[in-house]
Amino acid sequence: MYDGSLQWTGNSGPARHPNPAPDPMEALVRALHVVVPVLWTAAAAAYWVVFVRDDLPAARWGARLSLLAALLHVSDLAATGAAGLAPLLQPGTLVSGMGLAAALVYLVLERKIRKPSIGVFAIATAALLATVGSAIGDPFATAPEGVPTGRTSLHVAGAIAGYAGLLLAAIFGALLLAQQRALRNRRFGLFWERLPSIELLDSFTRGSLGAATIFLTVTIGLGHMARHYSDRMGTSWDPKVIATNLLWLLTLLTFAARKSKRMRPAVAARVSIGLFAYAFANMAIVSRFSQVHAGL
Amino acid sequence: MELIVAGLSHHTAPVELRERIAQPPERVPPALDRLVKTLGFAEGLLLSTCNRTELYARSSVSGSDHRALEFLDSLRPAGAPPLEGHVYVRQGDDALRHLFRVASGLDSMVVGEVEIARQMSDAYTLACQAGTAGALLNRAVPRALQIGKRVRTETALARGVSSVAGAVVALGERVFRDLSNCHVVTIGAGETVETALRALRPRTTGRLVICNRTAARAEALALKFNGQPAPLSDLPRRVAEADIVIAATAATEPLLRAAEIVEATRRRERPLMILDLGVPRDVEPAVGRLDNVYLHDVDDLRAITDRSIEQRSQEIPKAEAIVAMAVTEFRRRRQQMEAEPAIKALLDGMLRTRGEVLDHEKNLTPETREAVERATGRLVDRLLRRLAPRMKDGSTNPRQILDAFGIELASADTDEDHEEKA
């Protein structure tokens, strides 16, 4: 059961839905679990056409389908909450939630930078994560019961968005390094011609790092507040707390260094990839040795 | 009544002859006027570019090919070499296929180039203004432009870059987000630099500096491309301010060394792209290994263009298939449109004859006449239902059918007028 803090207590095994009879909300959640990855895939396909053919109608369709997919994805999370389960707190919805966050961060950047040719990489990542998320877990079998407080929801959503920002920074950074290497090694072909310029990839990397910094700041701040009011969430020396604070600090420093032009684009790209690897390790490994999220 | 094309192009005539025959736009309307009024063509369009001068016309009487050649010969200025052996004439489907191929860029010197579509569109506008575009050209030329667009959309015939100048822009677009605000510095003011600037300058509004040993040539090029001249001694400072450096001189030693570039780029944020188009090279190869600096030489540009040209050549069969389908479809549509007035005339003729026959029968009661009209109407309908498809698909000549029944095609129902209405 959810106790108002960042912790859930009680049944640690797979949660069973108390009502075995078919529930309309459960049916809706299951339907959205199928529709959302399909829509993300359709949006990725439209962006692929944009990438290959620089097609303006496809760009419009890509953006529309992405927005529709994002809307239904959010509805999916809301329906999960309405069904009495905690959204984003089981592996499947966590993974697909990261895809949603990555797509949203990208769509905001695209609106700002006005170059849709790179969207295939971000939206295809969202489609992949949404598909994997739908495939790896039945929310009605694994999600903890109970709806978290607004503060906890913000903490979890902020963490996912922050990690998604780092994921995007790593993707765009990797593309920047690939474009740079292709130019140095004299690789000329359709893929390299269609890949955006080094300057544009740098803009996307920097924007993603900026988004990651903002979301990590919010989520860590909320986490510290929650820990302050609860005596069951570990100490300040908890490995998760230390590792996450360090991640935030490194992300902030990288973003500041790149923003103030003290770091070269290629260096920032490499650091972004390293930061995402670190964030992934923090999520997958360090959390196992932490008491902060015990019971989640 | 069919399309005829007569002309000369880069396939058949050397540039010395092509440039003598080429017609500037202001000379085209009087030439078309002469074509229609003196030589008796019903319609005409003159396409004149640096690579071809072609007459597209509608032949209405026999001997059109000779008169088309006569027209081309009239464009030849005094003292120009004769056209014999350099001109070609095509008629009917061959002429139509040629028109579609030209509009698609399949017949161009650089296969897939897009400039020809604009040139054909301009030629068509001139013909319309001169009043020499009629039913046939009004259908064939816009259709050719559509087919050209379709070929470029559905195949990769126009993709990639096919010139060194285009490769310069393509490389710039892989480095910079927006070429328009890039500052350009050239080292040298020769023909190669001028070619590169011709492609790059329309895309950039940033500062242009021409560094050259000879001040007069630098000034002349700077004037041409809205830049400013500078001496070679200014080079380190100018390179530090530049985003794109184009080097093409006859110097035997590198003019830009890695140590100088390191110093010049120490405080810069934007990437630096250097295009070394000189042979021997003007930039030390070690510059290409520096961080945030992208060095390309003439071999890289050639690799880009060769690759594009090879890719385009692989697309030619697809483009030819689209053109062939378009020719068949165009012919089918024309046959249908030509047959429709004939079918109408045949129907009218049969009904008229029936009326005349029935009028001779004085003993018919109104009821009987009505019954006979119903039965013969069904008969005519059945006959025409069998005949009309054959007339439309061209397996039966509509004119021969009309002749066999002794039916005249009314002048108001001529195929051209019908097409105009369509």
Image (tube, coloured by chain):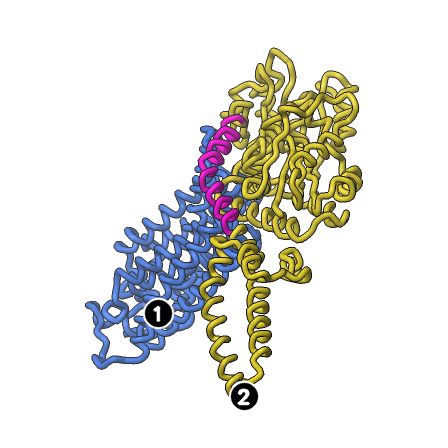
Chain colours: A blue, B yellow
- Judged from the image, the secondary structure of the residue bearing numbered disc 1 is helix
Q: Position of residue B405 (x, y in %)?
A: 55, 61
Please tell me in which quadrant of the rendered image residue B106 appears. Answer: top right
Numbered range of the magenta stretch: B302-329
Seen at 44% across and 68% down, the residue is A71
Work out whether B76 lies above or below B206. above
Residue denoted by label 1: A32
Q: Magenta stretch: residue A137 in it?
A: no
Seen at 65% across and 33% down, the residue is B7
Q: Is residue B273 left or right of residue A128?
A: right
Query: Which mark is drawn over residue B251?
Result: none
Q: Main secondary structure of the magenta part?
A: helix
Q: Is residue A23 left or right of residue B274?
A: left
In this view, the residue in front, B365 or B38, is: B365
Mark 1 residue type: Leu
Is residue B247 visible to the viewer in this orientation of the structure? yes
Q: Position of residue A102 (x, y in %)?
A: 43, 56
Work out whether B260 lies above or below A41. above
Crowd around label 2: few <14 · some 14–19 · many ≥20 (10 Å): few
**Residue found farthest to the left:** A13
- Judged from the image, the secondary structure of the residue bearing numbered disc 2 is loop
- Image mark 1: chain: A
Q: Magenta stretch: residue B305 in it?
A: yes
Work out whether B127 lies above or below B174. below
Mark 2 residue type: Thr
CA separation, marks 1 and 2? 77 Å
Q: Nearer the viewer, mark 1 or mark 2?
A: 2
Residue denoted by label 2: B365
Looking at the figure, which quarter contains the C terminus of chain B? bottom right
Q: Position of residue B374 (x, y in %)?
A: 49, 80
